[in-house]
Amino acid sequence: MLVAISVQHMLWGAGAAGCVATLLHDAAMNPAEVIKQRMQMYNSPYRKVTDCMRAVWQTEGAGAFYRSYTTQLTMNIPFQAIHFMTYEFLQEHLNPYRQYNPTSHMLSGACAGAVAAAATTPLDVCKTLLNTQESLALNSSNISGHITGMANAIRTVYKVGGITAYFRGVQARVIYQVPSTAIAWSVYEFFKYFITKQQEKRRAGH
C-alpha cells in the first residue's frame, strides 16, 4: 500500500513539474511559434522572419503574438503532464531500480511522447488555427475578423471538417514526437548519470 501511494505521488509530482516548466517555456516561445506557423502556411507571403514579425505587428498588433497563448497552455500543460507521468510510469515497470539503462530510457521516452501527442492532437489543431488564421477556415465559417479563444477555435474546426478534423495530422504528430522525446529523455538521463558519477568520484577523491 505504501509503495503504491509513493508511486502515485511520484507520478503526480512529475506531472506537476511538467506543467510548471510549460508555463515558463510557452510564455517565452509563443511569439516564435506564431511566426513559424505563418511562414509554414501554404503560399505564405513571408520569406523572412523579420518580414513576418513586422507584418503581424503592423496589421494585427502585439496581441497577435499571444492570441493562442492560453490555447498553447491548454494543449501543452496536458501534453507535458501526460508525457512526464507516462515516462515515470513506464520507468517504474521497465527500470524499477532506476539504474542508467539507455534502452529503457529511449523506449519509455518514445512511448510517452506518442501517448501525449495522440491525446492532445485536437488541441494542437485548434492552436494552429488560432496562430495561422487560415482564410479557408474563416471563409467556410463566415467569420469576419479573427478567430479568438479556444471555444471559438473548437467550433470553427468542427464546422470546417467535423469530428475527424480534430485528428488531422495525428500520425505525423506522433511520428515527430516519438524520436524527439526518445532522444530528449536519453540525453537527459545520460547527462544525469554522467554528472552523478563525476560527483561521486570527486567525493571519493576527498
Image (cartoon, helix red, strand yellow):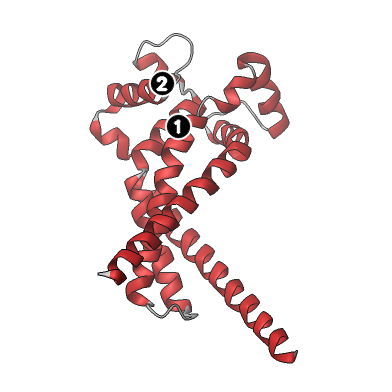
Amino acid type shown at disc 2: Leu
Q: Which mark is residue 71?
A: 1
Q: As drawn, which residue projects farthest toward the right?
A: 206
In the image, residue 101 above or below residue 173: below
- In the structure shown, which secondary structural element does the residue marked by tag 1 occupy? helix
What element does badge 2 sit on? helix
Q: Nearer the viewer, residue 199 or 35?
A: 199
The crowd level at tag 2 (other Cα within 10 Å; few <14, some 14-19, many 20+) is few
The answer to whether mark 1 and mark 2 are in CB contact below 8 A is: no
Look at 47% across and 26% down and name the residue there: 130
Task: Say which quarter of the image contains residue 141.
Answer: top left
User: Mark 1 belongs to which amino acid?
Assistant: Thr
- Which percent across, then down, holds residue 192? 59, 72
Q: Which residue is mark 2?
A: 136
* Residue 77 visible, this angle: yes
User: Compared to 23, does 129 lie above or below?
Assistant: above
Image position, residue 183 (x, y; %): 52, 65
Q: Position of residue 156 (x, y in %)?
A: 34, 21
Q: Which quadrant of the figure contains the C terminus? A: bottom right
Query: Is residue 7 found left or right of 16 in the rendered image?
Result: left
Precedes in sequence: disc 1 or disc 2:
1
In the image, residue 99 sits, relative to residue 84, either above or below, namely below
For this view, does 55 lie left or right of residue 77?
Answer: right
Residue 47: give its label. none
At x 69%, y 90%, the residue is 204
